[in-house]
Amino acid sequence: MMKKIIKILSIILLTTILLIIYLSFIGIKTDKFNKNIKNNIQKINKKINLDLKNVKFLLDPFNFSTNVSTQDSIILLEGKKLEIREIKTTISLKSLILDQFLIDDLKISTKKIKLNNIIMLAQSFKNSTELFLLNNFIKEGFLTADIKLKFDTEGKLKENYQVDGYINSGKFNFLNKLSAKNLSLNFNISKNKYSLSEVYTEINDVKFSSPLIEIREKKNLFLIKGKISTSKKNFSKDQLDLIFSNFLKNNNIEKASFSSENNISFNVSKKLKFNNLNIVSKINVDQLVIKNNFINLKPYLPNLDKIINLENHKVIINYNKNKLIINGNGEVLIKDSLDTINYEVMKNNNKFIFETKVNFKNNKLLISSLNYEKKENLDSTILIKGNFRKNSPINFDLISLIEKNNEILFKNLSLSKDFKFISIDSFNFNYLNNKKIKNQLSLKKDNLNYIIAGESFDATQLINRVINSDSENLSLFENLNSKISLKINKTYIDDINFINYLSGTINFKNNKINDLKLNSFFPNDKIINLSIITNDKKEKITKLFTDYPKPLIKRYDFIKGFEEGLLVYYSVKKDKISNGLLTIEKFKVKKVPAFAKLLTLASLQGIADLLTGEGIRFTDFEMKFSNKKDLTTIEEMYAIGPAVSILMEGYIESKKIVSLRGTLVPATTINKSIASIPLLGNILIGKKTGEGVFGVSFKIKGKPEDLKTTVNPVKTLTPRFITRTLEKIKKN
């Protein structure tokens, strides 16, 4: 009996063991529990309905549970079919035996599913703003995923879920500004963390790729960071405006061709507000065309067009919140000539700090105010360091130009918007200008004042500016209130003539010369003195004296062959009206074209021949005149000499009209007329008279480039002419 019992128990035990082994390794398939599984799924999510095939059960005897799986099922969600490759879950044996089992975990492996459908599935478990927006952004695409979910006893999703998968053929549209197509990537999603790897897409026809992009959810923000590369692409202006719109308000880039590697991070709120943007970009620029509408460089680079063309540049951009740093180097193309440039620009809030080094060899460089010209095929280097703020002055810490033995250097220079000097600490010139004149000059700031000293300086350009300008304010400064002390050994006043040992002071008040005193000597030891004094009546009194006026008169093209003489100029200016007196004594001129023509018209050919030959000598020249804006009124101009005398008056309106009239008389006629005056004539002239040649009256009128001259003979001189002549004769 005992043997039978043992045998039966052994058979039962063996059968049980074999059954356990079979159920553990092979399992069974049945649809008996399908209804229970569907009911449990609907407890988790009422919107989901499962179309299950046979369910396979594998026993887990050690955990007293069974692993349940099914193949090729379909999730039905609001009329959409999501094809599932496999669904797995674990059910306790106790709940299975009692027919009240609960699902505490769920593993779903999908087939190829549309992205919008998988988002709909996610929304059915946990609806959120980001999923709603994502569903609106996604236009096309497919997803394959492995989903691991865990639930509590009430069927609610736990936070330790895991989703892995692959997306391909994706198409997005973001706020109608960014359009992405051909998106493919691997993804890994867990609680508050999204990892995207092997990303590839085309955004606005630009190819982007990334080895890894990480997204973390923190409170109400998404923290995004990753490495993104772009392939070489030709960009239009519209595309560039879109790319740089977040941190460059005024984009002057017309077109570009480049590739890049970018490390990027930023935050996005659930309301799609972007902030804390950080970008580190390495850019290989094949071409960058910039419209130059912020500074006029044409006077300095005569070959420059309206655009600046950069080629073969290596650029590093570092953008962090309100701070932007750009480092780069490459070639700059001006017309058909290439030169090299290095640059660094930093923007911090509204402040820009810049440093630029340009090596010019193939292009011409001009600085007309300094008469400097760097010709083509000569090496030169320009270094510029400075900073500026919006609507504030431009501050240059250093501007230097070096070309062979030539050097031009400025330190701590501040310029206004219209490039007027606000302040400067120093400059140093040591260069040969385009007239082969050596400029060796320096300026140093001394508290609020300045000291200018040097061996030699070409002041021609400065003098021309003073003579040709209609403006009362000729200062290079915006508002100068300082004293400038001068000491220059050799100062050129034109291409040939120079003065030695120029010294003195110039006091500026409200950017205008308040008083001035300058002394110097010509190489022949003749002197030249200039002074300006502003008195208590706010009258500006100018005095100029030289016993060698030839270099000064030489500047006026209508007078040739001026020799000898002594010049005194005196003027008083108040309220923009000046009254002046110019006198020149004991001089002669060889050629005055307009004067010679006048003598010819008056049939005084002998004197005209003398003027163009040996020259006519004058003992006195005097002109009283006044200036008001562009109008010069000649109250009286009188010249007397052994051969001829002239008395003239009229006005000249700059660049508009000339109107002059006067009397011109040979000296013999003057002597004859004065000699006819009883008693006085005998005393002044004597009894012998001239040959009785008649004088002429004349008029000169018209536009400066088209003057009309008329003459009429006169038999009787005006009392005014005789009076002025007598005054001069008495004086002499």
Image (cartoon, helix red, strand yellow):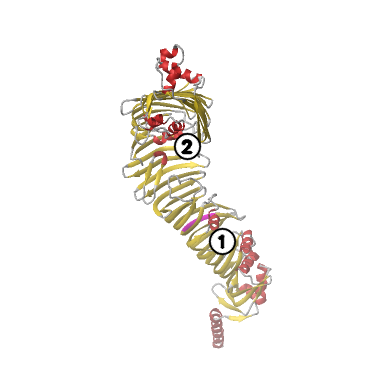
| Residue 2 in the image, given as x and y percentages of width and height | 55, 86
| Residue 379 in the image, given as x and y percentages of width and height | 34, 48
Q: Tag 2's secondary structure? A: loop
Q: Tag 1's secondary structure? A: loop
Dot 2 corresponds to which residue?
420
- In the image, what residue type sits under mark 2? Lys
Q: Nearer the viewer, residue 188 or 617?
A: 617
Q: Earlier in the sequence, mark 1 or mark 2?
A: 1
Image label count: 2
Q: Residue at x 65, y 67 (%)?
A: 44
Note whether 466 is above or below 317 in the view shown: above
In the rendered structure, does residue 262 fall within the stretch colored magenta? Answer: yes
Q: Is residue 424 visible?
A: no
**Quarter occupied by residue 691:** top left
Q: Is residue 596 visible?
A: yes
Quadrant placement of the N terminus: bottom right
Q: Residues within 10 Å of mark 1 (few under 14, many from 20)?
A: few
Q: Which marked residue is nearer to the observer: mark 1 or mark 2?
A: 2
Q: Residue at x 48, y 34 (%)?
A: 469
Q: Nearer the viewer, residue 449 or 611?
A: 611
| Residue 445 in the image, given as x and y percentages of width and height | 40, 31
Note whether 166 is above or below 538 in the view shown: below
Which span of residues is magenta-colored?
Answer: 261-266
Dot 1 corresponds to which residue?
191
Note whether 376 is above or below 595 in the view shown: below
| Residue 326 in the image, given as x and y percentages of width and height | 45, 50
Quadrant placement of the C terminus: top left
- In the image, what residue type sits under mark 1? Lys
